[in-house]
Image (spheres, rainbow, N blue to C red):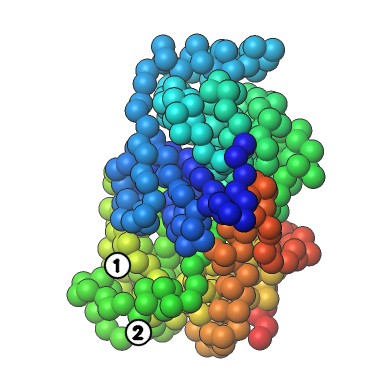
């Protein structure tokens, strides 16, 4: 692999993700790309599809490389060639499913990309993108280093009803454990995800590095947080804003947030805003119907995806994460960075790590609107100091994440990396206290 030196410090970095929908993986990837570019490195954003709301976040000096989607007859022979000694592992997760994972369709194009462009390092994100990246490196014969980053808790994903029906996922852990060993580095976005990945896939725990997702700080964040809000983005009135942010999908459990808000609203004036794009048709209508049934429709607003959520964090009285699973929980970090108080479910695995087991925000049980409502009201009554929250957010800067990735790739000395905290106790009480 070509390594930068003092005379030629620029590295050639490629970032590979499914596409540009408006999720946390996409925002983290764009923040990482922007920081690499700021340091003078060359960056390609390699994507399965260039369409999506996150396209607005692509740094202007990054090169966007959409991969051509090819059919089963193109990727199946390549996957077969990539695992000559372990083809048994490919059968149920890769070769036999009638509805394969989308990342597989981009394997031939990624092989071509690596063979022709030869970046110093390819950082991939999410399970099947990681598999495809490792196979593409082997098939192309290049010396590009591969960093496979896992953003989700695999065991929790396997428990989802739709994943139980998708039997290919039941047979994926053995394949993941076999293939990931050929990556130059394995990264998880929280310690809990790393523990889970090692246990489920039989990977050595010391092969896995935790690098928290990056968030931008400094003047750029201040500019985004102070940007004005267009008319119609908030419900009418001047009552405190309770904020939720995330795609309108089941794991975010916004129904529990709406039920908790109804309990709060019965006792005091408040407004609820939930930002996020609809992934499944009818989900927004379902949530609004629930608000209507609870008699709070006038105080609940779902404006959809917004390119700049920081201006909402800066104006909210409390941000609530209602998820029943997260790899990390980028939005918790973004709220802290803006000085916004946080209430979060104690879901596996990221929020308790970010909030240091309740030090920086109240943690509540999953799916429990009563304890969530109590934590929201306690936070409204006694919000922590903004400076205290922002200081915690600084541990998740893009600068630290970029330095950690570059160090793993052998491209740059590591800067300070967020300190490891004691492992959180996930058998949490209903709502842990807040200090500071």
Can you give x and y, in whole percent of width and height, for residue 172 in the image? 62, 27
Relative height, residue 245 to residue 23 (above, below)? below
User: Can I make out residue 156 in this image?
Assistant: no
Can you give x and y, in whole percent of width and height, for residue 421 in the image? 75, 66
The foreground one among 402 and 341 is 402
The residue that disc 2 covers is 239
Relative height, residue 119 to residue 116 (above, below)? below
Secondary structure of the residue carrying tag 2 is: loop
The residue that disc 1 covers is 301
User: Can I make out residue 224 in this image?
Assistant: yes
Secondary structure of the residue carrying tag 1 is: strand
Report the quarter where the N terminus lies.
top right
The foreground one among 42 and 93 is 42
Can you give x and y, in whole percent of width and height, for residue 60 in the image? 33, 56
The part of the image, by quadrant, that contains residue 102 is top left
In the shown orientation, is residue 66 left or right of residue 376?
A: left
The foreground one among 121 and 345 is 121
The residue shown at (51%, 45%) is: 12
């Amino acid at each position: 692999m070509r390594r930068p030196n003092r005379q030629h410090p620029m590295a050639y970095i490629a970032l590979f993700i499914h596409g540009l929908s408006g999720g946390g993986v996409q925002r983290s990837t764009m923040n990482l790309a922007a920081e690499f570019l700021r340091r003078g490195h060359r960056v390609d954003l390699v994507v399965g599809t260039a369409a999506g709301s996150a396209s607005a976040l692509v740094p202007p000096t990054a090169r966007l490389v959409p991969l051509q989607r090819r059919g089963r007859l193109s990727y199946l022979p390549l996957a077969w060639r990539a695992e000559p000694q372990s083809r048994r592992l490919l059968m149920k997760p890769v070769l036999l499913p009638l509805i394969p994972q989308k990342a597989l369709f981009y394997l031939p194009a990624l092989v071509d990309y690596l063979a022709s462009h030869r970046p110093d390092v390819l950082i991939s994100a999410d399970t099947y993108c990681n598999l495809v990246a490792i196979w593409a490196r082997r098939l192309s014969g290049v010396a590009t280093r591969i960093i496979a980053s896992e953003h989700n808790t695999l065991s929790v994903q396997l428990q989802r009803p739709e994943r139980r029906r998708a039997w290919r996922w039941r047979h994926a852990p053995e394949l993941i454990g076999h293939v990931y060993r050929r990556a130059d580095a394995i990264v998880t976005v929280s310690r809990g995800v790393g523990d889970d990945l090692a246990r489920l896939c039989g990977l050595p725990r010391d092969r896995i590095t935790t690098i928290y997702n990056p968030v931008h700080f400094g003047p750029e964040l201040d500019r985004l947080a102070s940007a004005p809000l267009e008319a119609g983005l908030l419900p009418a009135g001047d009552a405190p804003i309770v904020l939720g942010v995330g795609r309108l999908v089941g794991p975010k459990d916004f129904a529990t947030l709406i039920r908790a808000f109804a309990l709060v609203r019965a006792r005091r004036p408040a407004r609820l805003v939930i930002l996020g794009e609809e992934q499944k048709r009818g989900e927004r209508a379902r949530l609004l119907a629930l608000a209507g049934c609870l008699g709070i429709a006038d105080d609940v607003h779902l404006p959809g995806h917004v390119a700049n959520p920081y201006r909402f964090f800066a104006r909210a009285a409390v941000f609530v994460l209602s998820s029943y699973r997260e790899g990390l929980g980028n939005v918790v970090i973004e709220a802290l960075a803006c000085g916004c108080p946080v209430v979060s479910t104690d879901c596996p695995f990221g929020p308790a790590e970010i909030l240091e087991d309740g030090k920086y925000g109240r943690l509540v049980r999953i799916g429990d609107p009563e304890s969530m409502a109590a934590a929201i009201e306690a936070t409204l009554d006694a919000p922590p100091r903004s400076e205290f929250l922002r200081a915690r957010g600084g541990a998740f800067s893009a600068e630290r994440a970029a330095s950690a990735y570059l160090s793993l790739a052998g491209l740059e000395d590591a800067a300070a990396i967020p300190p490891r905290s004691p492992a959180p106790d996930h058998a949490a009480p209903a709502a842990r206290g807040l200090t500071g």
